[in-house]
Each structure stands twice: as structure tokens, then as C-alpha cells.
């Protein structure tokens, strides 16, 4: 194991302390776990991209054709529910973008 000195805003440190206490773990364990989760999320695409390049559509369909066309066991069936309704995109109201100070000065 190695040590890492970390500067945190006081508010973040207090929230981390409270969360760690609530979870019954140390702040070190909380930070290690959070870092591992974040790294996993960031590295997932890096892991999957080379595998996707190796993929082959015709080999996929050949493998799929070997799967028997039988009904799933009762405990493997999906519940019969109506398909979800498609959500319509909502309009977001944005404030106009502020110009940088230098651009505002030039306009005057």
C-alpha cells in the first residue's frame, strides 16, 4: 500500500466523514472505493473498444443461429407488461451565454 496526501475542501471532507461513519467504514475505505468506481467507469470504454473492433457481424449471426428456438423456462420469462411509452424530449430553457469580459469591453 502507498500513502497519498490529498487536499479537499472542508465541506467535501465533512460530507465524506459523515458518509463513512454512516456506512461504518473509514474515510480511507470510502475514498478508495469511490476512486475504484470512478476508474472503472472511465476505463470501461477503453476495455470494450478493442473487443468491439474484433467483433464480426457474420460470426455473431452464425452463433445466434445455433441457439435453439424454444420457449424459456417459467422462471426465466419476462413479466408481460406493456412496452414503455417513448418519452418526448423536453425543451430546456437556457440563459443566454455571457460574453467574456474582454468581448464586453470591446463592444462599449
Image (cartoon, rainbow, N blue to C red):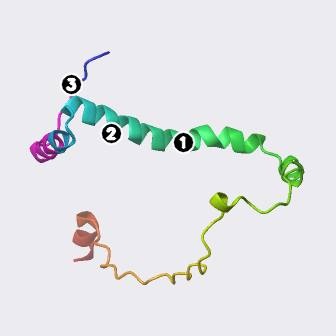
Q: Which residues are magenta?
A: 6-18
Mark 2: give few (<14), some (14-19) or many (20+) Cα within 10 Å.
few
Please report the residue visible at 62 percent of the width from the left and 75 percent of the height from the top: 80
State the CA–CA distance, disc 1 to disc 3.
27 Å
Please report the residue visible at 18 percent of the width from the left and 42 percent of the height from the top: 16
Q: Are marks 2 and 3 in contact (CB under 8 Å)?
A: no
Decide whether the magenta segment is chiefly helix, strand or loop.
Answer: helix
The quarter holding residue 49 reads top right
Mark 1: give few (<14), some (14-19) or many (20+) Cα within 10 Å.
few
Q: Are marks 2 and 1 in contact (CB under 8 Å)?
A: no
Residue matched to label 3:
5
Q: Position of residue 83 (x, y in %)?
A: 61, 79
Of circles 1 and 3, the one toward us is 1
Q: Position of residue 72 (x, y in %)?
A: 73, 60
- Tell me if 96 is positioned left or right of 28 in this view: right
Residue matched to label 2:
34
The quarter holding residue 54 reads top right
Q: Earlier in the sequence, mark 2 or mark 3?
A: 3
Residue matched to label 1:
44
Q: Which mark is residue 6?
A: none
Amino acid at each position: 500500500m502507498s500513502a497519498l496526501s490529498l487536499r479537499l475542501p472542508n465541506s467535501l471532507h465533512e460530507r465524506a466523514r459523515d458518509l463513512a461513519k454512516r456506512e461504518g467504514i473509514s474515510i480511507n475505505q470510502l475514498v478508495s472505493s469511490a476512486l475504484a468506481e470512478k476508474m472503472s467507469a472511465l476505463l470501461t470504454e477503453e476495455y470494450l473498444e478493442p473487443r468491439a473492433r474484433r467483433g464480426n457481424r457474420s460470426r455473431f449471426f452464425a452463433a445466434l443461429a445455433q441457439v435453439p428456438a424454444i420457449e424459456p423456462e417459467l422462471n426465466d420469462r419476462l413479466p408481460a407488461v406493456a412496452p414503455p411509452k417513448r418519452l418526448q424530449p423536453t425543451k430546456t430553457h437556457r440563459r443566454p451565454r455571457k460574453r467574456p469580459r474582454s468581448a464586453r469591453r470591446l463592444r462599449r
